[in-house]
Image (cartoon, rainbow, N blue to C red):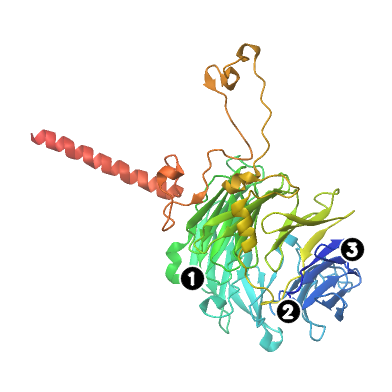
Amino acid sequence: LAMATPVIVARQPNEIAFYASGAAEPSHSLPAQQFLFSADATKLVTSTAEGVDVYDASGKNKLASIPESGVVLMALSPSTGYLVTCTKPQKDGGDGSPAKNLKVWDLSTGSCVLALTQKTVVKDQWPVMHWSADDSALMHCVTNNVHVYTKADNFATYRKVTVKGVSGMALSPAASGPAASRLAAFIPEAKGSLASAGVYDWSGSAASEPTALVRKSFFRTQGAKLMWNKTGSAVLVLGFTDVDVTNQSYYGEQKLHYLPSDPAKSDAACTVALPKEGPVHDVQWSPAGDFFAVVAGFIPAKVMLYDAACKPVYDLGSGPYNLVRWNPFGRFLAVAGFGNLPGDIIFYDKKASGACKQMGAVRSPAVTAEWSPDGRSLLTALVAPRLRVDNAFKVFTYYGEQVSTQPFATLFEASWTPAAPGTYEDRPQSPSRLAAASTSSPTAAGGAPAAAAAAGAKAAAPAARAAGYVPPHLRGAGGAAATVGGAPRPQFSLAFDENDRPGRVLGAGPGGRPASARQQPPGAEFVSKAASKNAKKRANKKKKEGGEGSDDEEAAQ
């Protein structure tokens, strides 16, 4: 049976347009200032100045309308039965008290089942309502408490789960088992106390003050982003602060922490040993929940793959990258450098062991990237307000060949329409593609040869730099221009590290590359600062004890 072709939705000023893959003209359009698809691909929600409309996923049949004007943020529950809307904070026309601008709507009836006041409306902190996997419970974080509303009483009442100082939370996405009742909470620094993150059990029927099942404290953290994996077995905490006390970064400081949800494994909670010093640009769990990828460090940033137990598995090399995206099946992986970076995109095929094989590379400046629901194409978009010129979206194959492009006068957003679970199957690289790659050099988009595509993350290496100024007395034959004062001229690149050697991380399991192949300098192994300090103390103590023993022997003689 022929599978449905993924469709692209482009948001322009006051409307969204639907484009079939490769089509130059949209099939139809809808008035909208923003839009939202349900995860099961059954609903499309749009908002305008007048209200909110609900369509089927094709956008051709209107299912319901909600009379709520001025909506700035929207979110759907996991089972798509409820819609959460938020408008800008304002005063009530009656007594001047804050109006209830955060509302939960039952999409089956179109009625509002819960209305609350949200004083701060920030897109980076959205959503502020957190649902259980089956929509049976809804949670809202307030001062020192998490309010738990249940579907059983139509969200009329709530019970308190006390977590002192809590400022952010995230619910485990697991649908069953002990992980289904896990809640991750972040507590910022206050009155000299350290910031911390913990995993709690929110289940129960009465108000409670649960003890953290797993907890980790850390320094210099004002806020955090909490990211669960699909199975609910672990949560990543990306902590950040606005000021870098080391004065190494204008954009503050970031640290990544790992917390397992199983209290029996609480000792595994740790700060992720990043491969390079510097900011954490991006972190993404695999859709299967068995690996996560990190882009970290000063440019050229390092890309590293970790397993679900937070052990480094594969080094994907370094380069001008700040973004990583998995395809829906967790098989293919795209690493890119967007924004102020040139736009290099490297495509990898991740094996079951965690080893990654490069499939292709291309350079295409963009702002966003998203894999198609069939996992075979990557959509990139150059959008406003990041850039006001050359707005467009482009579609690439999973190995980097450009398929289509569509320019716009103004484009705010571009994304794929989702597909219902089971619509597409996880497929490896096409046999014809593998055969072509093994018999001839791959070609990058635009026809440029990419013979370097098999050379790890250096496939999109920059063009050769112009030679620097050479004083007249050093000009001449014999390669004198390559030296300065008899020493080799320094070679430096902000984009790529010529000494970088991607591959399996030492100690990551069978097939790990030997130290001689890695050519790592002393101290370059994945060892945390605390572990390194303790190792030095033990070595000094052993050396001291050995020295004392030698003195005693000499005295005895």
Residue appearing at x 67%, y 20% in the figure: 469
Earlier residue among tags 1 and 2: 2
Q: Nearer the viewer, mark 1 or mark 3?
A: 3
Q: Is residue 136 left or right of residue 37?
A: left
Residue on which the image places disc 3: 25
Image x and y of residue 212, in percent:
50, 69
Q: Position of residue 24 (x, y in %)?
A: 87, 61
Of the residues shown, which amino acid type is indicated by label 2? Thr
- Which percent across, then down, holds residue 449? 69, 44
Q: Quadrant of the N terminus?
A: bottom right
Q: Which residue is mark 2?
A: 80
Mark 1 residue type: Leu
First reached walking from the N terminus: tag 2 or tag 3: 3
- Distance between mark 1 and mark 2 Cα atoms: 30 Å
Q: Residue 231 — which label?
A: none
Badge 1 or badge 3: first in the primary sequence? 3
How many residues crowd around disc 3 within 10 Å: few (fewer than 14), some, or many (20 or more)?
few
Distance of label 2 from label 3 (alpha carbons): 31 Å
Q: Nearer the viewer, residue 275 or 253?
A: 275
Q: Secondary structure at mark 2?
A: loop
In the rendered structure, which amino acid carries the disc numbered 3?
Glu
